[in-house]
Amino acid sequence: MNTRTRALLFLPLGAALAAFLLWGLAGLPDFGSTQGPYARYLARHATAQRHVTNVPTSIVFDYRALDTLGEELILFTCVMGTALLLRSSREAEEQRPSDRPTSAAQRHLVSLLIPVTVLLGLWTISYGYLTPGGGFQGGVVCGAAALMLWAAGGYRDHRALTPTGLVDAAEGLGAAAYIGLGLAVLAAGHAFLANVLPLGSTGTLASGGTIAVLNWATGLEVSAATVLVFHEFLKEYVQTLPGAAED
Amino acid sequence: MAADLVPLTVAAPLVAAALLAALAQFLPRWVPDLTAIVVAAGVTALGVLLTLASRAHPIVYWFGGWRPAGGTALGIDFVVEPLSASLVALTGLLTTTSLVFSWRYFEEVGHLYHALVLALLAGMAGFALSGDLFNIFVWFELMSVSAYALCGYQIHQSAVVQGAINFTVVNSTGAFTLLLGIVLVYGRTGALNLAEIGEALGSRPPDGLVTVAFTLITTGLLVKAGAVPFHFWLSDAYAVAPAPVGALFTGIMSDLAYHTFARVYWDGFSGALGSASAAVRDGLLALGVASAVIGAVMCLLQADLKRQLAFLTVSHGGVFLAGIALLTPRGLAGATLFVITDGLLKAALFLTFATVVRSLGSGDELALHGRGRTPREALPALIFLCCALGFAALPPFGTFLSAALIHDSPGPGWPFPVLAACLAVTSAAFLRAGARIFLGWGPRHDPLLTSAPGKPGEPGEPGDGEPDHGGGGAARGRTALLIPALALVAAAYATAFVPGVAAEFITASHSFEQPRQTAHQVLTGHLPPSPPSASYTPTPGAWTTAAAATAAALALAAVSLRTPGSRPGRLRRVLVPPAKALKSLHDGEVGDYTLWFTTGLLALGLAWTLTLR
């Protein structure tokens, strides 16, 4: 089937699909009109039960911590799968990395922003259960700092600071720490991923029990995963740059 | 006691995967191999233990210890009952076999391979056990992403890239569809727990939202299962997966989605759709029979062994779906038992293909004509024969018992003869291929059959998706490679002789189809009454039909091996145009596949819009 025929056939089908979906969406309650039983329960009880002020984080790392475990492992598997495929497709041994010339202004500005970015990422992780943020969000910000190294023209620095072995290990250990905590709690005779650590006082960094630990494990895993993805794709990209083949 | 072990079904493989990814690069090759095998064997043992422990009543495990408060689920639960637990055992067993096989099969394998296989195992186990709709989606995604990467393992071959991309695009579309259905259900009920959704939807007649949500969720799961017309990706992907991975895909991964669909229907929707259960049954039966027929015909038209098995997976998937669609304990019991016995045979055959490709140099039955006529190939030939006869439900073995349960279920009688004919056709395809390869029967060329594109079957060329290997190592360790496959075949045949296995599956299915009782246990913790015990012996009708299917398979294989040149058959001339038309639909164009996906979704949606009341 050529593209044109396909497009012509898809037009009526797409329209019918849109109508079908709208029919379903029309059955939803009006925006803000009702609150489900789960939302009502958590809005009322979550802070008292878990001593954390960011209720979504308490859902992510406590009430529904198993979903987060699965999602973290999805990210882990995606990154590992990408690494597996890209590494095996790179047949030739890589050339020595070389820096890309950039302007002095770009180098200085970006170099200045790197520590700020790392700090912002760490802050987003640390306060994830008090204010909006958390391990996932902060981890991505931290990972972005590694990409900024490259943006500053320092591909060699980027490569030196993100050796494959170390990043692989950090990613795997971050994921293993999350599951390992669940297993440790299980071994101690509680339910898997039950929050058994002291809950601390609400509104301080020392609160939330295992929420804080899982938050940091996720932060480590997501940072490493982000760095690893940038690392692998940058390797692909620099091979396409003019001059890469001649070295 | 057994209840405390439930989380290990996912936690053990996942923690092993994470640790292997982190540390295996510093360890010798045997460490990840052995670790992965031990963990997968552990999951198998756990699956068997949980199957036995949940016979009296399901085990409900609340993660984080969050028990429901006032009928509202706060956390996530796994609901372990014998059907899903036995599928976890099967998943573990096939993964163990696959890992044992890959230890000898891959001459070099990166440490990430084991991590991905373990992630796939955990994804499948969670997908089979979870009692929470969103959590089911999470495991669906985990098993999908690990499968995409494993499917594309030999990424330097262009057919592999295309197959893996089609797999990824169509399955991701299915995942979005599933998620959209979950969003609609959550918007209506405010709940993600299946038991709570079932209670909240209640027995009110279904309106637009419920119809659309149920259609979307069904479609999303049937994409993963590879039911017609959502199956197009499956043959492209399974044909290029490396053998140990392909054995997992065809053996269990797609069929697991049928089981999860059955759970989502019974626990979440059967109350709301109960008054329209005939409409649900007919819609699913139509898809099941269509899958069985189209899969069987396409299977017969392939010369490439892996594609034959891929289409057999579609065809037999249709039989499972039809069994589930009957909405009876016997239908569900037969379908589940069929997933197990048929899965063992399919995985065994996929592994055997790999050794045939390696020693004879091609995976194409026409190219292999007569090349297997040596005593060295006796063992693969035996496995071929056993699997092919098993596919035709040869009495009195495992697949027969499963098919007999579906045959003897109450419900409309018309589908079963069609399904039995499809079993015979798929069986004939492998009898024909086996006779051609190992006995040298039949012609060398057959215009009806499709060979894999661009592969003349040169000796020494690896099949699509298989690793390159040195020519000299062909015979080394061959028998060791085939022992796992032989063990799987023996297990499939022996299943029928486990005392009371059919009755146990009927009893478990009976409880499975009592959603109010399950919901009561999940949400309040009250144990249900012990299920009534069942008994079962196949009826004479089942024996006759299965024997006829086996005979038909042998006859069809003989007919399809006749030399077309000897008598230019009118039948063949009549058959060629429709066969070409059907094949041209499976053209590898992912855009076309999406078009068929949309058509299928709308057809199902329209049918249910008109009939669900």
Image (tube, coloured by chain):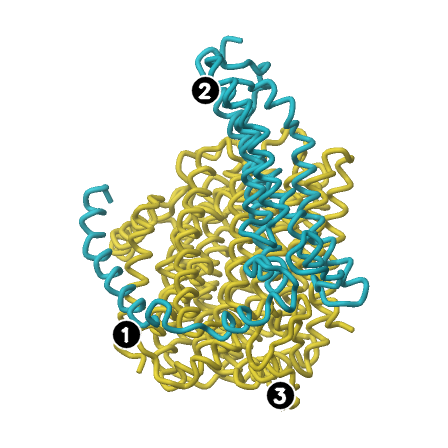
Chain colours: A cyan, B yellow
Any mark on residue A240, and which? Answer: 2
Label 3 CA crowd tier, 10 Å (few <14, some 14–19, many 20+): few
Q: What is the spatial separation of the Cα atoms under label 2 and label 3, in whole angstroms?
A: 68 Å
Mark in the foreground, 3 or 1: 1
**Element carrying mark 3:** loop
Any mark on residue B473, and which? Answer: none
Q: Is residue B27 above or below residue B255?
A: above
Examine the image and state in which quarter residue A25 appears: bottom left
Q: Residue furthest right?
A: A188
Q: Amino acid at mark 2?
A: Thr
Examine the image and state in which quarter residue B103 appears: top right
Q: Residue at x 73, y 50 (%)?
A: B37
The residue at which mark 3 appears reads as: B535
Q: Amino acid at mark 1?
A: Thr
Where is residue A175 drawn, in percent x and y?
66, 47
| Residue B613 or residue B243, whichever sits in front | B613
Where is residue B144 drawn, in percent x and y?
51, 52
Q: Residue furthest top?
A: A246
Residue B450 shows in the view: yes
Where is residue B565 drawn, in percent x and y?
33, 46
Q: What is the spatial separation of the Cα atoms under label 3 and label 1, in whole angstroms?
A: 39 Å
The residue at which mark 1 appears reads as: B609
Q: Amino acid at mark 3?
A: Ser
Q: Is residue A110 above or below residue B19?
A: above
Label 1 CA crowd tier, 10 Å (few <14, some 14–19, many 20+): some
Q: Are marks 3 and 1 on the same chain?
A: yes
Q: Earlier in the sequence, mark 3 or mark 1?
A: 3
Indicate the chain on which mark 2 is placed.
A
Q: Residue at x 28, y 72 (%)?
A: B607
Indicate the chain on which mark 1 is placed.
B
